[in-house]
Image (cartoon, grey):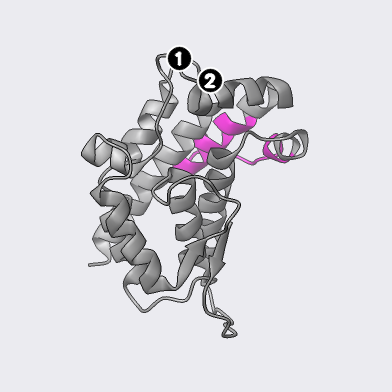
């Protein structure tokens, strides 16, 4: 998890829509950082859907959760993110933007983290430009648990997520090894497209 360097008390006043946005980001962060256990799969199997884009994506995640189990999801996660087979994904901005790891996108991101006064907890081994960590940061900015000045959330999204993360979710949605995670890819691609549109309109 992320840790705040500052120890000042902070009580956010967050609109309901931002709480919902934070929940979507937090769900994506969780599913990208580890495979779902049986408890999480049970919760996902109760997701409600509707005719809207996010509702349709929720329905896909629900159906995917119903047809898998903890063991199959763990094998799928390993094949997608931890294996060495062809078709494995590298969920890092440096990979998508610079075709390398630990590249300039990661350096810029670390500067942004310093500005927010946050750092990666010691037990986290992934570099900061991992998609799960970026979604976790966006969740914190959306719900106010990461204090930031006005406009900082939009700026962070536009610089560090918009240029690449929808391509990653598209790749996840269509990965050969993906079944449950294909639905996660659909949810991420759909939600991040709506976020990009909303931030563009907020200029």
Q: Is residue 196 above or below residue 110?
A: above
- Across the whole image, how many numbered discs are drawn on residues? 2
**Residue 60 falls in image quadrant:** top right
Residue 56 falls inside the magenta stretch: yes
Q: Secondary structure at mark 1?
A: loop
Left or right of 202? Residue 3 is right
User: Can the viewer see residue 33?
Assistant: yes
Query: Where is residue 35 drawn, in percent x and y?
Result: 63, 33
Which residue is at the front of the view, 102 or 159? 102
Left or right of 69? Residue 179 is left
Q: Which residues are magenta?
A: 43-62
Which residue is at the front of the view, 3 or 186? 3
Query: Where is residue 28 drawn, in percent x and y?
Result: 53, 44
Q: Secondary structure at mark 2?
A: helix
Left or right of 184? Residue 157 is left
Q: Quadrant of the N terminus?
A: bottom right
**Residue 169 falls in image quadrant:** top left
- Do labels 1 and 2 touch, CB within 8 Å? yes
Task: Report the residue at 58% width, 32% height from top.
Answer: 61
The earlier-in-sequence mark between 1 and 2 is 2
Task: Report the residue at 47% width, 59% height from top.
Answer: 137
Q: Quadrant of the C terminus?
A: bottom left
Q: Which residue is mark 2?
A: 79
Q: Which mark is residue 162?
A: none
Query: Where is residue 46 drawn, in percent x and y?
Result: 71, 38
Q: Which residue is mark 1?
A: 85
Query: Where is residue 93 drawn, in percent x and y?
Result: 32, 43
Q: Is residue 137 above or below residue 31?
A: below
Circle 2 packing at 10 Å, graded few (<14), some (14-19), many (20+), is some
Q: Is residue 81 above or below residue 127?
A: above
What's the distance in space between the residues labelled 1 and 2, CA to CA? 7 Å
Residue 32 falls inside the magenta stretch: no
């Amino acid at each position: 998890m992320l840790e705040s360097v500052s120890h000042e008390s902070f009580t956010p006043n967050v609109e309901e829509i931002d709480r919902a946005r934070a929940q979507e980001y937090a769900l994506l962060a969780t599913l990208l950082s580890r495979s779902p256990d049986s408890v999480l799969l049970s919760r996902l199997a109760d997701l409600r859907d509707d005719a809207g884009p996010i509702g349709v994506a929720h329905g896909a995640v629900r159906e995917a959760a119903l047809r898998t189990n903890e063991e199959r999801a763990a094998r799928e996660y390993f094949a997608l993110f931890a294996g060495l087979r062809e078709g494995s994904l590298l969920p890092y901005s440096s990979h998508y933007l610079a075709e390398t790891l630990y590249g300039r996108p990661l350096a810029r991101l670390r500067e942004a983290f310093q500005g927010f006064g946050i750092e990666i907890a010691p037990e986290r081994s992934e570099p900061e430009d991992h998609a799960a960590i970026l979604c976790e940061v966006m969740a914190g900015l959306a719900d106010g648990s990461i204090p930031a000045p006005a406009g900082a959330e939009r700026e962070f999204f536009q610089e560090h997520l918009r240029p690449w993360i929808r391509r990653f979710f598209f790749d996840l949605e269509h990965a050969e090894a993906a079944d449950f995670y294909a639905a996660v890819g659909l949810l991420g691609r759909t939600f991040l497209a709506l976020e990009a549109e909303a931030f563009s309109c907020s200029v």
